[in-house]
Amino acid sequence: MSKKVFLETVGCQMNVLDSELVAATLRKAGYQLVADPKQADVILFNTCSVRQHAEDKIYSALGQLRRHKQRHPHKIIGVLGCMAQKDQELIRQRAPHVDIICGPGQLGKLLYLLEEVERTRQPQLAVSLGRADAHRPEVERSFESYDPLREPELRTNRFQAYVRTQFGCDKFCTYCIVPSVRGPEQSRHPDEIVAEVRFLADQGCKEVTLVGQTVNSYHYRFGDGRMVRLSDLLYRLHDIPGIRRIKFITNFPRDMTDDLLQAVRDLPKVCRYLHVPAQSGCDIILRRMKRMYTVAFYRDMLARCRETIPGVAISSDFIVGFCGETEESFQRTCDLVAHAGFKNSYIFKYSPRPGTKAFELYPDDVPEEVKRRRNNDLLAIQAKVSLADHRRFIGQTVEILVEGPSKWAYKLSNHTGHDAGQPSDWLQLTGRTGTDHIVVFDGPKNLIGEFVQVFIEDASPYTLFGRLSSPVLADNGEKTKEGMLLEPITLLGSRAHDNSAEQPNPAYEDRETSFSNGSRSLYQRRLSLPIVQDQA
Ligand code: 5AD
Ligand code: SF4
C-alpha cells in the first residue's frame, strides 16, 4: 500500500511552486497526498520566514503534533523551506519531534532524507551555506537548483504554471530575510527555462507566470559575454505555440528598464500587468529600507510604465509601521497610494526579523496598535482607488482565462445563485483578465481552463461581476492583448467537454482570499495540493 503524505504550504509563489514540485516528486515515488495530517505517514510543512506570524503558525502546528508523534513514533515530520534554512537546529530545540529539516536549496534531497530517517531513525538536516559561510560561488552551489521535469498529472492544473527564472535575491532590503534564506541571486539558463515552458505548453499549459524574487533583475551572462535579459527571454517564450499568456512577478522598481517595458508593449502574449512593490511613500523610510530609489523615482517609473504600455495595470506592496515611521512618513505613503492608481496593494505590518539589518540597527518603535491602524487606513484608501479602477470595466467585455469555481461556489455545494432557466450544471466561476483583474460569473464547469469573453455588469474594489458573453475562444486570441477592453460578442455555443482542469489553481484561489479580506497577505496563505485517490 502506498505511503500517505500531508503537505502544507505557507508563503509566496516560490513556495507554491516548490510544493508542487515536492508533491510531484513524492507522488512519482509512490506516495499518496492526503488532506488530514493525522492520516499521513509523512507530515511536511513548506514554510515562510518573511513575517513572524507565518513562523508562529508553523510552530503552533508542530506543537499540536507532539502528542500524535509520541503515539505514532514511526510517522515522519518534516519542516521544509525558508524556516528550515533560517532556524535549522532551533526547530529541533523547539520541536524535538521533527525528523527532517530541509532548506529551500536542498529540496532535491528530500526523498533521500525520508529514506535516511526510515533507515536510521535519526533526524536529518539538509541546509545550504549561510551567505557569510564561504565565498560566493560556494554559497551559490549550496543552493541547488530544483526544477525537475513536470508531468501534467502531477501539477495542480494543466492550463497554468509557475516557472522559476531565478533563485535568491541580492537586494538586501534592510527588513527582509529572503536574501539570507534563499541565498544569492542566480538566474537560470535561458535554454532551461524555454525548454520547461515548451514542455508545459506541449502538455496543454496556456498561461505561464515567471517567478523570481526580483524577476526583472533576471540576467544570464554567457562565457563569451553575451547577456540575456528578461525582455530577451520574453521574446523567446513568446514564440512557443500553445502559450497564450505570459506573466512575471515580482518586479524591483529600479530594474524596470525600457527594454522590458517595450517587450511588454510589443509582445501580445505578455500580460499588461506589473507587480512593482513600492514599500513606502516616504524617502526617509525608503532610505532606511535600503530600497535604492526615491518616491520621485518610483512615480517616474510608474509614469514610464503607463506611457509605454497603454492599459497596463500596476499593483504594489507596502509595509506600514517600519522602524522610525512617523505620522508624517505614513501620510506620504497614503498620498502615494491615493494618487498612484494601483489596481491593488498588498499591505503588511512591519515584522522585525532577526538576521536582517533593520533588526540589528533600528528599534521596532511603532506600537502594534498604530501599525494596525495604519494598515487599515491604507487598505481603505486603496479600496477606493481599486473600486474606481474596477468600475471602468462596467459595460465592457473582457477576455478571461477561467480558473475554477469561485470561493462562494465552493462553499455552496448546492449552488442556486444563477438565474432561473440556466442549465443546472452551471456554477459561479472565477477567472482573470490579462491585467490580473478577478472576474466572477456564472457558467458551465467545462469552461475551466478556457478563454472566454465576459460582459462586465458590476464591480467591487476586488472583483468584477459579469455575464458570459461567449464561451468560445477568440480565434485571434494570440494577437489581442487579453484583458484589454473588447466589443461584446454574442453567445456562440458551448465548448467540447474538457475536465482536465477541474481543480482551481490554489495559488490563485488564495490570492482571491487575500484580496477579499485585504490585509491577509498573498505571502501568508495556506495551500493544499489536490488530493488524489489511491490509484489501486
Ligand atoms: N515585515 C513585513 N513585511 C515584509 N515584507 C518583507 N519583509 C517584511 C517584514 N519583515 C513584505 C514586503 C515584500 C513582501 C513579499 O513582504 O512588502 O514585498
Ligand atoms: Fe526581500 Fe527586497 Fe529581495 Fe524583495 S527585493 S526579496 S523585499 S530583499
Image (cartoon, rainbow, N blue to C red):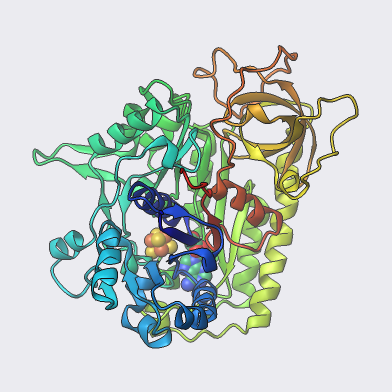
Q: Is residue 174 above or below residue 411?
A: below
Instruction: Please say if 104 is above or below 155.
Output: below
Task: Say left or right for 329 vs 242.
Answer: right
Which residue does the image show at 59% across and 32% down from the upper left? 311
**292 on left or right of 417:** left
Q: Is residue 477 left or right of residue 430?
A: left
Viewer-nearest residue: 504 or 380: 504
Q: Residue at x 32, y 68 (%)?
A: 102
Figure quadrant of the N terminus: bottom left
| Residue 350 visible to the viewer | yes
Q: Residue at x 25, y 52 (%)?
A: 145
**Residue at x 36%, y 35% (from the top left corner):** 259
- Place of residue 430 in the rendered image (x, y in percent of width and height, measured from the top left): 67, 38
Tell which of 327 and 16 is nearer to you: 16
Taking the view exactly as shown, the residue that stands out farthest to the right is 420
Horizontal side of 201 relative to 132 (left or right) equals right
Which of the 4 image quarters holds residue 257? top left
Do we see residue 285 in this rendering? no
The number of callouts visible is 0
Q: Quadrant of ligand 2?
A: bottom left
The location of residue 247, given as percent across then percent down, is 47, 38
Looking at this view, is 333 or 383 the one in front? 383
> Residue 105 appears at what percent x and percent y?
28, 61
Expressed as whole percent of the image width and height from the top left, the position of residue 132 reads: 20, 75
